[in-house]
Image (cartoon, coloured by chain):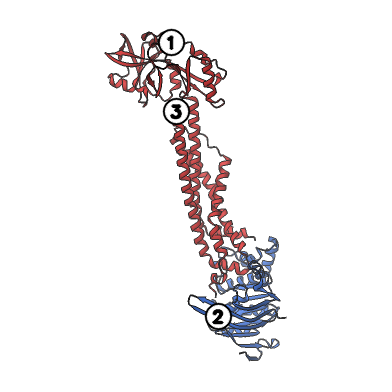
């Protein structure tokens, strides 16, 4: 059983007189340990796909199963709990709470759990250490560089050890050097077994992932994957899915 | 970290916005506390004045002949009346069971005398008792100490073209004017005050009295009971509680109370409105933040709690500061309104708790809609759906 299973996914946005079909009949399976890039031009539906996968956006039709749980069968509150336990989110920008320090931001997902303060601080310290921001725990976000802020966001997304990491344009606001550092980080996390689903419009980023899914006009256009063993210099096998 | 830390840190690190929020609510609470404190001061002041100064019981002869009025109350006629009050009645008043409640007994004889061919009302009093009764009298000069001295009411002095130090003749007797009263706005302005015995002799009514005014404390004993006991001792007299003295003063206080309530409601509503609009603006500004909370896995109830906690903290601070300020302001303006000297600054724990509770309640109620609005924000639109 795949970690993520999507069947016949459809999403229609109704805006006044117009109906926009953001996603049409998308079928997708994502296995544990994969690093997926979702690519496509703007309007292709990749953002919609991510939000639906993330339990943030009800599909118009179709099923989303994560770890064999039909997530859209859950109540809104249970879905919130599910997100907390299963998913780590990295958003495009402005994702840190400006009035919380680095470590407080990282502890955010833990603040609504039963964990004691001491446990929370320990978990946060560990992940900050891993991410390379151990010395900046008490800084506020506006005292950090773009790359550092991104790292804090990654730390926050990972502090609860969620099975799936969801990232939306993680390098969108970064210069190429910092962007590369972030992608290297993702790569090393994936090597340790972290499942990652990343939306990006930067083709260079896809070289870090194990599989690339291209969307156009709401449909899956191509799925390109690398052999895991040859990563990152594997041959590309292209499959066309109609 | 807990939810409360999110609320606290938001308030701590965004002081500018919080400041206006607190100020609005604080002004409301300060106003309410000030009004309550000043009302209390006025109440105390009136009670004290009622208890210590001014008569609250009037004793007149039982009579159907009403031809003279004093202080708006009709007193017995000047004509010969079988049931006059006498000097001997006075000590009886001090013999009632609750005599410790009797503060001042001031007997009076009212009549008409002739001065320079004009008829002028003359009132014979015992100056020491009357002055205890009428603390509001302001005398230009001094009170009469002997039987050939008189005190003039303001209007009389004007009409007779006399002032302190002058003389006048009453029924042939030369009298020295030792003092003139400041205008009181009452019947007293039109009277000449002389020693009681002199008045009794001059009017040829030895030992007689027109009325007796009594000031009694009613704290431990209701005034009706005191009236009843005096009536028992003086069966030939009509004893009444001067409710109107009490009434006008109480009415004034009552008006002030109603006014205070009205003002308080308005001011608190404005405070609520300030909290509400500020919270709504704040929540709208924090769309992204709330989107992040929701995406991370915060339930709606978590988001509501964060907003409520912020409002509660603001309410608590506004309550404490509002109470302290209210205490200070009432300490300054209270004496101005009541004429009392500022007493010691004492902290009423009940009022303090009430102020803090009210402030917190307003904070929470005013932020209810913003909080629920925040929790319902669709995370995708809040994050500007990427």
Chain B tint as drawn: red
Which x, y percent locates residue B374?
Answer: 55, 63
Residue B82, disc? 1
The residue identified by callout 2 is A22
**Which quadrant: the N terminus of chain B?**
bottom right
Q: Is B136 above or below relative to B305?
A: above
Q: Is residue B242 visible?
A: yes
Tell me how far mark 1 sits from mark 2, CA to CA.
111 Å
User: Residue A222: where, in percent of width, then height?
Assistant: 60, 88
**Distance (Cα) linking label 2 and label 3:** 83 Å
Residue B195 locus on image (x, y percent): 40, 13
Q: Which mark is residue B337?
A: none
- Using the image, determine if residue A122 lies above or below residue B135: below
Q: Which mark is residue B244?
A: 3
Q: Nearer the viewer, residue A79 or B127?
A: A79
Q: Quick one: label 3 or label 1, which is nearer the N terminus?
A: 1
Mark 2, secondary structure of its residue: strand
Chain in blue on the image: A
Q: Is residue A42 above or below residue B371?
A: below
**Disc 2 packing (10 Å; few <14; some 14–19; many ≥20):** many
Residue at the right extreme of this rendering? A1
Q: The C terminus of chain B appears in which quarter of the rendering?
A: bottom right
Whether labels 1 and 2 belong to a single chain: the reply is no
Quadrant of residue B166 within the rendered picture: top left
Chain name for mark 1: B
């Amino acid at each position: 059983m795949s970690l993520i299973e999507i069947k016949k996914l459809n999403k229609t946005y109704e805006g006044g007189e117009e109906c926009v079909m953001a996603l049409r009949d998308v079928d997708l399976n994502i296995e544990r340990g994969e690093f997926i890039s979702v690519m496509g031009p703007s309007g292709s539906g990749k953002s919609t796909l991510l939000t639906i996968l993330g339990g943030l956006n009800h599909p118009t039709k179709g099923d989303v199963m994560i770890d064999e749980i039909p997530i859209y069968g859950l109540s809104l509150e249970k879905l919130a709990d599910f997100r907390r336990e299963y998913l780590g989110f990295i958003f495009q920008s402005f994702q840190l709470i400006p009035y919380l320090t680095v470590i407080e931001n990282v502890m955010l997902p833990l603040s609504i759990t039963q964990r004691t303060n001491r446990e929370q601080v320990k978990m946060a310290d560990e992940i900050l250490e891993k991410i390379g921001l151990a010395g900046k725990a008490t800084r506020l976000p506006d005292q950090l560089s773009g790359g550092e802020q991104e790292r804090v966001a990654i730390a926050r997304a990972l502090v609860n050890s969620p099975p799936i990491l969801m990232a939306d344009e993680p390098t969108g606001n970064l210069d190429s050097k910092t962007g590369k550092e972030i992608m290297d980080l993702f790569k090393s996390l994936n090597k340790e077994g972290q499942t990652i689903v990343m939306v990006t419009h930067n083709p260079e980023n896809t070289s870090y992932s194990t599989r690339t899914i291209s969307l156009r006009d709401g449909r899956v256009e191509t799925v390109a994957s690398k052999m895991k063993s040859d990563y990152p210099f594997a041959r590309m096998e292209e499959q066309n899915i109609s | 970290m807990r939810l409360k830390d999110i609320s606290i840190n938001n308030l701590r690190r965004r002081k500018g916005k919080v400041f206006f929020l607190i100020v609005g609510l604080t002004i409301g609470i300060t106003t309410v506390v000030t009004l309550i404190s000043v009302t209390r001061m006025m109440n105390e002041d009136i009670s004290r004045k009622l208890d210590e100064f001014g008569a609250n019981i009037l004793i007149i002869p039982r009579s159907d002949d009403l031809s003279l009025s004093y202080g708006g109350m009709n007193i017995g006629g000047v004509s010969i009346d079988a049931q006059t009050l006498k000097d001997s009645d006075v000590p009886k008043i001090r013999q009632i069971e609750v005599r410790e409640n009797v503060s001042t007994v001031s007997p009076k004889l009212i009549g008409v005398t002739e001065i320079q061919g004009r008829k002028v009302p003359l009132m014979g009093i015992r100056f020491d008792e009357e002055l205890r009764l009428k603390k509001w009298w302001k005398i230009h000069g001094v009170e009469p100490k002997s039987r050939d001295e008189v005190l003039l009411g303001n209007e009389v002095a004007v009409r007779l073209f006399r002032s302190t130090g002058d003389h006048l003749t009453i029924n042939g007797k030369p009298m020295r004017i030792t003092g003139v009263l400041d205008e009181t706005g009452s019947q007293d302005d039109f009277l000449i005050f002389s020693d009681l015995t002199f008045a009794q002799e001059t009017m040829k009514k030895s030992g007689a009295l027109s009325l007796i005014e009594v000031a009694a404390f009613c704290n431990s004993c209701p005034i009706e009971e005191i009236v009843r006991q005096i009536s028992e001792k003086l069966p030939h007299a009509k004893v009444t509680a001067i409710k109107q003295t009490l009434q006008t003063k109480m009415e004034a206080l009552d008006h002030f109370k109603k006014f205070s309530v009205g003002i308080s409601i308005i001011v608190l509503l404005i405070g609520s409105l300030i909290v509400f609009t500020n919270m709504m603006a704040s929540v709208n500004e924090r769309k992204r933040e709330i989107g992040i909370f929701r995406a991370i896995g915060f339930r709606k109830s978590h988001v509501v709690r964060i907003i409520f906690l912020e409002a509660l903290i603001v309410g608590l601070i506004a309550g404490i500061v509002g109470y302290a300020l209210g205490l200070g302001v009432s300490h300054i303006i209270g004496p101005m309104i009541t004429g009392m000297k500022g007493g010691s600054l004492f902290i009423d724990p009940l009022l303090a708790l009430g102020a803090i509770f009210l402030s917190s309640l307003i904070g929470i109620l005013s932020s209810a809609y913003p909080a629920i609005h925040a929790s319902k924000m669709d995370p995708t639109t809040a994050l500007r759906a990427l």
